[in-house]
Amino acid sequence: MASIHSRATARLMLSPAVILLLVWMAAPLVMTLWYSLHDYQLLMPRGNPFLGLENYAYFLSDPGFLQSIGNTFMLVMGVLLITVVCGVGLALLLDQPMYGRGVVRVLVVAPFFVMPTVSALVWKNMFMNPVNGLFAWMAQMFGADAIDWLAQVPLLSLTLIVAWGWLPFATLILLTALQSLDTEQKEAAEMDGANAWARFLHITLPHLSRAITVVILIQTIFLLSLFAEIFVTTNGGPGTQSSNLAYLVYSHALLRFDVGSASAGGVIAVVAANILALLLMRLVGKSLEV
Amino acid sequence: MTSIALKNVSKRYGAHEVIPGLDLEIEAGELVVFVGPSGCGKSTLLRLIAGLEDVSSGQLLIDGRDATRLPPAQRGLSMVFQSYALYPHMSVRDNIAFPLKMARRSKSVIERKVNDAARVLNLQEYLDRKPRELSGGQRQRVAIGRAIVREPVAFLFDEPLSNLDAALRVNMRMEIAGLHQQLGATMIYVTHDQVEAMTLADRIVVLNAGRVEQVGTPLELYRSPATLFVAGFIGSPRMNLLGGFEARQYGAATIGIRPEHVALSSSEGRWRGKVSLAEHLGSDTFVYVDVDGLGTITVRTTGDVDVRPGDSLWVTPEETCLHRFDEHGRAIRQGPPQRH
Ligand SMILES: Nc1ncnc2c1ncn2[C@@H]1O[C@H](COP(=O)(O)OP(=O)(O)OP(=O)(O)O)[C@@H](O)[C@H]1O
Ligand SMILES: [Mg+2]
């Protein structure tokens, strides 16, 4: 945007998209805010009297609330950790010259094309099932007791399932970043006496920092509203052991039919997400400026 | 002070033979320049010496010891890349300190050496900047700084000045020459630029299609090129090369005469021709004369001659300065060049 004139044109051209987005986002947000301040229970059609902040107090005092915040946090962090660490490893492997690299790359990307509900069901029934699952069979081969994954370690199981789905995304972005690394830089480091590990630490990893930031930011946005995988596997249970904030809102809205408190939960989730986003930007956003 | 020797070194990429088997001795403390046309294998040769590529066959000796299979870091060589290859996320200080950190030197030693290098290269003010905040010449100096702190046994430069403008190139050329005198280290320098080659080199190695055409001091190459290729490659403007009848008169397949060894006259001479172009450089004038049956003859004369395109002139080669080449392009040395 060189001149004032071209900037004005740019704004004009952008406006339809921005206006559409505003309407699209503003309308539901305003409605959610309105519902959250009123008594609106689907099972008790008695008008919608104004309640003030009572819905908020009710949602915040839900016994599962604190746990759902913790679960949301654990899920996001767990998946980020696995996808970034394994993504870097896989990207490094896929960057090596090897026979059939093209086919392997396509295979690695494949999980991304599987719908979350489908992948979660496959994991639940074919891998983690304590009777028929692959993991149970493997445990029995070694004479160990089968683990009922989704009942005993529901949060860990969910983290694994979701991480599996997001790993290709992270790998792909990191791989493209890796391919843009100047080979002369690596060679210079080699001549400077850096061994493979030092080259990774001092050359490759800093080069990847930007891509890692992008992966973290994008995944966080999607992982905060994680729902499908929880819905088809654990239903947030046992108890509320694997409910995240999104699932808690769902349970208020469509299990207890309390639109008012669910809306309050939704607003709280939006605020929480923004706080987290701000924190993340502070923490990792700096590397985007380089 | 280290000598480097290549014994029958060859390099193939698959079936494509880039260097067919090459012998070369580089003496301790020498500054050797590799020149040759694009794609002739200069970079490849340098990378073989550095250890960034494996030789296909042959032997590389550094100080008389076999280094053919040594990893790059253990050869004790430093390389300055054409793209500089600075580490973009590190400050200038960290860039220069990197080889020392990798060698696990103590903090105080690193500090002292980095400061020394910065002083030699005039980089003190820039130590805390990132490479992208530097100009091309400053980046170049950082790259050299990173190369010298390790106190390598020899330096390898791959077209280090090709990204710089003409004025800066002259400056950096003098700095590199100064550095060579100051450190007395062995240096191998790859370049496209004739002037760089002629001014910097103790000895020049002319490469052609992976083969050594000739090795010698700049003046040796200029005065007595061993092959037609060297004759045409060294010197600017190019040597005039003539074949056919004129060459046969001297018992050669091709004869060559440098532009400064051709005399111009308006009244008499060997060949008569028409001036097609006259380049007035101030100190010199390059006159291009079209001679019927011979082609264009380039003549270099003083700056004050007044010739214009279209003028009719006589040109005469100085017979004692003729170069003669046989049908294989090799120089004929026996006997003075004489017309039969
Ligand atoms: N990795 C490679 N695989 C196959 N061929 C290669 C490879 N690297 C270089 N070559 C070939 O080797 C030859 C010599 O390349 P090299 O880079 O040494 O040329 P150069 O003399 O440095 O040229 P320039 O002056 O343009 O830098 C070229 O023909 C090139 O195509
Ligand atoms: Mg090259």
Image (tube, coloured by chain):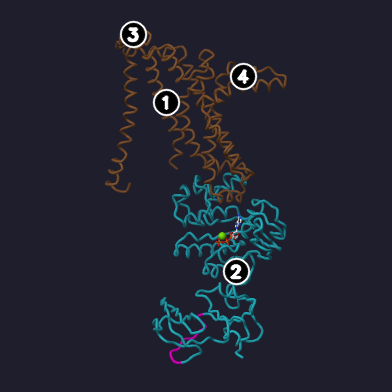
Chain colours: A brown, B cyan
Question: Does dot 3 land on a helix, a strand or a loop?
Answer: loop
User: Distance between the Cα atoms at labels 2 and 3?
Assistant: 97 Å
Residue type at tag 1: Ala
Query: Was residue A209 drawn as part of the magenta stretch in this picture?
Result: no
Q: Is residue B76 above or below residue A149?
A: below
Q: Mark 4 points at which residue?
A: A129
**Do the residues indicated by labels 4 and 3 lie within the same chain of the protein?**
yes
Q: Distance between the residues labelled 4 and 1?
A: 33 Å
**Residue B91 x %, y %:** 49, 46
Q: Mark 1 points at which residue?
A: A273
Q: What residue type is labelled 3?
A: Pro
Q: Which quadrant holds residue A270?
A: top left
Where does residue A262 sit, x and y in percent of width and height?
39, 16
| Above/below status of A205 relative to A262 | below
Disc 4 marks which amino acid?
Answer: Asn
The answer to which of marks 1 and 3 sits earlier in the sequence is 3
Task: Classify mark 1: helix, strand or loop.
Answer: helix
Which image quarter holds the C terminus of chain A?
top left
Rendered view: B227 above or below B249: above
